[in-house]
Image: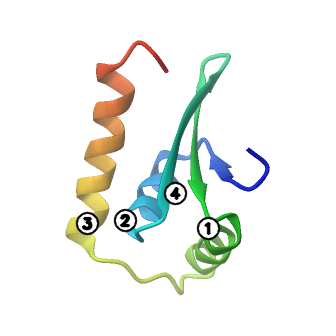
Amino acid sequence: MKDEYSTKNLQIAAFLYSCKLQFAGTKRINSEIYFSFTPKDKAEELVNNYFQDKALCNPRDLFARLHDLKDLIFSSNSI
């Protein structure tokens, strides 16, 4: 898991997913869900761009991936 980028922020996770990063899965730690993506270096670059207001993405893809991740959280007891 060291080569994966993990976040518990749903919006960041949806952004990374919409940028076509490989979704590596989820992990529940206590009551929080962490989303993991690869490659880690690309994810870190995208997150830096996000916080510097330099990120670009397709809004329809972003909202579709947000919906997908919410479905994953709320429809599965295996997380």
Contact between marks 2 and 4 (CB within 8 A): the answer is no
> For residue 40, which quarter of the picture?
bottom right
Reading the chain from its start, which is encountered first: label 2 or label 4?
A: 4
* SS at circle 2: helix
Label 4 sits on residue? 12
Contact between marks 1 and 4 (CB within 8 A): the answer is no
Contact between marks 3 and 2 (CB within 8 A): the answer is yes
Residue 57 shown left or right of residue 12 in the figure = left
> For residue 37, which quarter of the picture?
bottom right
Label 3 sits on residue? 61
Circle 1: residue type: Ala
User: Of the numbered discs in the image, which one, if any, rests on residue 18?
Assistant: 2
Alpha-carbon distance for marks 1 and 4?
10 Å
Circle 2: residue type: Ser
* SS at circle 4: helix
* SS at circle 1: helix
Label 1 sits on residue? 43
Alpha-carbon distance for marks 3 and 4?
13 Å
Alpha-carbon distance for marks 2 and 4?
10 Å
* SS at circle 3: helix
